[in-house]
Amino acid sequence: MQNTGYLYLILPQLRKIYGDGTPELKQAMKTHVQFFNTSNFFNTIITGIDLALEEKQGSESLDAVAGLKAGLLGPFAAIGDSLFAALVPTIFGAIAANMAISGNPTGLFIWILANIFIMIFRWKQLKFAYKEGVNLVTTMQNQMNALTDAATLLGVFMVGALIATMINVHIGWKPMIGKVPLDIQNTIDMMMPKLLPAAIVGIIYWMLGKKNMTSTRAIFIVLIVSVALSALGVIAQ
């Protein structure tokens, strides 16, 4: 997973701490090739704390470092992926996409600035974690669960907003009742606006929970069904 990349990242510093080719360096390298997999956006916090510990205590800290990495990789994976792999791209991607649809190029620069901010954040958190060391774990422990819950809730909220704004599907079929056409879409909107996009997302979510169903297959199914229903005049944009 990320263990060899993590070792490659800190190896120059390990050589400064333990010396090149020493038994302590080999021991540290063996410690750092153990399983490690976390969010790419928060891994620098673990790196900073790790280096602070090893600089202070040397090889005596390796057991603590291994435990620290094992204990933090899970929570940081959840928080980092929720915030920076899902929430931030969803928000800024939606803003950029809406601007692009309307012909406004500003959305492109918003997307670029968002990614620049993330890169700066990763660099700053490395320096901050290195400075604070293991005390940072104690400080963040009580806030971690609350941050995860808040990020999850905000992510769900944004997904709901995107469903209502980005999925533009309407029922185009208007059956005749006598000589009067029945506007099914207008009737649905009177009961609950954007019910059809929500229903489509719900069906796709249900499909993805089925065995052997993948996101790629779901996309092809949606494309085929959409083209067929559009050709028949059942749905319209």
Image (cartoon, rainbow, N blue to C red):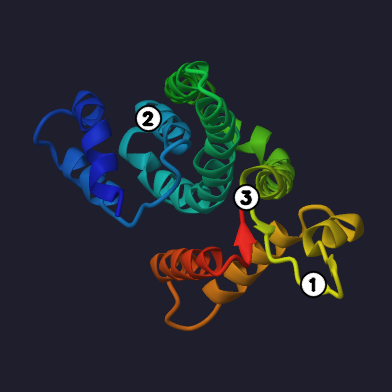
Please tell me which residue lies in front, 26 or 206: 206
Of the numbered discs in the image, which one, if any, rests on residue 103? none
Mark toward the start of the polypeptide (3 vs 1)? 3
Amino acid type assigned to the residue bearing label 2 in the image: Leu
Q: Residue at x 53, y 28 (%)?
A: 96
Q: Which residue is mark 1?
A: 176
Q: Residues within 10 Å of mark 2 (few under 14, many from 20)?
A: many
Circle 2: element type: helix
State how far apart marks 2 and 3 are (Cα): 47 Å
Please tell me which residue lies in front, 97 or 25: 97
Q: Which residue is mark 2?
A: 51
Amino acid type assigned to the residue bearing label 1 in the image: Met
Q: Residue at x 22, y 51 (%)?
A: 30
Circle 1: element type: strand
Q: Which residue is mark 3?
A: 167
Give the quarter of the image for residue 122. Answer: top left
Amino acid type assigned to the residue bearing label 3 in the image: Ile
Please tell me which residue lies in front, 22 or 232: 232
Please tell me which residue lies in front, 214 or 88: 214
State how far apart marks 1 and 2 are (Cα): 74 Å
Question: Is the Cβ of the residue at disc 3 closer than 8 Å to that at disc 1?
Answer: no
Q: Residues within 10 Å of mark 1 (few under 14, many from 20)?
A: few
Q: Is residue 111 above or below residue 46?
A: above
